[in-house]
Image (tube, helix red, strand yellow):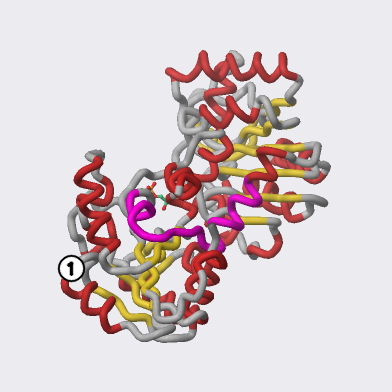
Amino acid sequence: LTVSDLGDLRGKRVLVRSDLNVPLDGKTIADDGRVRASVPTIKRLADAGARVLVTAHLGRPDGVPNPDYSLEPVAERLAELLGTPVLFAGDTVGPQAHRISAALQDGQVAVLENVRFNEGETSKDDAVRGAFADELAALADVFVSDGFGVVHRKQASVYDVATRLPAAVGELVEAEVTVLKRLTESPERPYTVVLGGSKVSDKLGVIDNLLAKADNLLIGGGMVFTFLKAQGHEVGKSLLEDDQLDIARGYIQQAEAQGVRLVLPTDIVVAPAFADADAQVVAADAIPSDQLGLDIGSDSAAAFAEIIRGSKTVFWNGPMGVFEMASFAEGTRSVAQALTEVDGLSVVGGGDSAAAVRQLGFSDDQFGHISTGGGASLEYLEGKTLPGLSILEGN
Ligand code: 3PG
């Protein structure tokens, strides 16, 4: 069900689960992409006369209230983006939340304090989680699930509450699922996937699945060194997951057997330490023993860009290098630039890659879609069942 299926919402108290998990610099929001992505559903509900209660998490405060993880600055940003005042409850299901829920007027919006300040939210015990979901549900008449970035979590505000109230998905979840479905069910070819980020072990499931679907798999970022080592090259002081070498070797063989072009960088930007100094480019099979790789080199970036530009569908997750430092940002910048030139569907998946493209000066509308979900979009591409989606299908 979508919001349109919920009927007349005027005067109804609607609990919206958004993903407002933004990177913070102290109290300053470093990238407000997830807040902006949450606005259309909240605005639509408010415009329909609903009394909107937004619930969300920030960070992983482990069930304990912690002012460093307060959603208050995020509520302030939401108010700016909505252009209307937003009330803030200093608790999630306590007296303040109840007072606000009872006092909300038609069309008003309130944000509840970080849902993960309550241990029931993330508890593995169904009964504990269920009891907390009962408390959340008591605040509202209807539930709207719009936090795409968190639908892979079996948590009270994502999963359990959906069985306690009439429930539907919001516009963000609907849009994300529509795009990701295109990638999994009917990608226009050539279909290229670019994977970066630091760890092979984080991407195992998705690589497995993509080897059966993609035409090209381009690998950069910290995990590339495990692949290079698996090919028998020395990687100096670069990041290495020794326990993943056999797996990486297996992927290289599997790609060959399945006719997938698995492309590794041929040159690497290295430096003597994890610092923005003394960078040089070396061949990927000749990384000196006293250096560590921190970005893909310019030849590799050009080769990756050419394959990306020649594709009809591209999914990209994970930076190519340490893009936060100027000497190691070019690989990520080239990949982002190439995605903006794709004549087809380009999808940027994941918090890190989304933050990277914005930090490098690209704007969201240069890409086909920027997913708000890191783990969630990868698990979707793996073909896993996402609890926050399956519970709504079950309803
Ligand atoms: C994310 O940042 O990917 C989502 O907000 C989920 O956060 P989590 O990994 O802490 O559950």
- In this rendering, position of residue 59 left or right of residue 4: left
Left or right of 48? Residue 59 is left
Residue wearing tag 1: 94
Is residue 59 visible in this depiction of the protein?
A: no
Give the residue drawn at x 68%, y 31%: 217
Can residue 301 be seen by looking at this rendering?
A: yes
185 w.r.t. 336: above or below: above
Q: In the image, what residue type sits under mark 1?
A: Gly
Judged from the image, the secondary structure of the residue bearing numbered disc 1 is: loop
The magenta stretch spans residue 171: yes
Examine the rendered structure and indicate whether residue 136 appears above or below residue 106: above
Is residue 258 shown above or below 387? above
Predominant secondary structure in magenta? helix
Residue 261: percent from left, percent from top: 74, 26
Q: Is residue 227 left or right of residue 109?
A: right
Is 224 in front, or is 142? 142
* Percent of width and height locating residue 233: 59, 17
Disc 1 CB within 8 Å of nearest ligand 1 atom: no
Region rendered in magenta: 160-180
| Image spot of residue 323 (x, y percent) | 55, 50
Q: Nearer the viewer, residue 300 or 2?
A: 2
Q: Is residue 348 magenta?
A: no
Residue 115 percent location from the top left of the image: 28, 59
Q: Residue at x 27, y 55 (%)?
A: 133
Q: Which residue is more in the foreground, 30 or 272?
A: 30
Q: Is residue 83 left or right of residue 256?
A: left
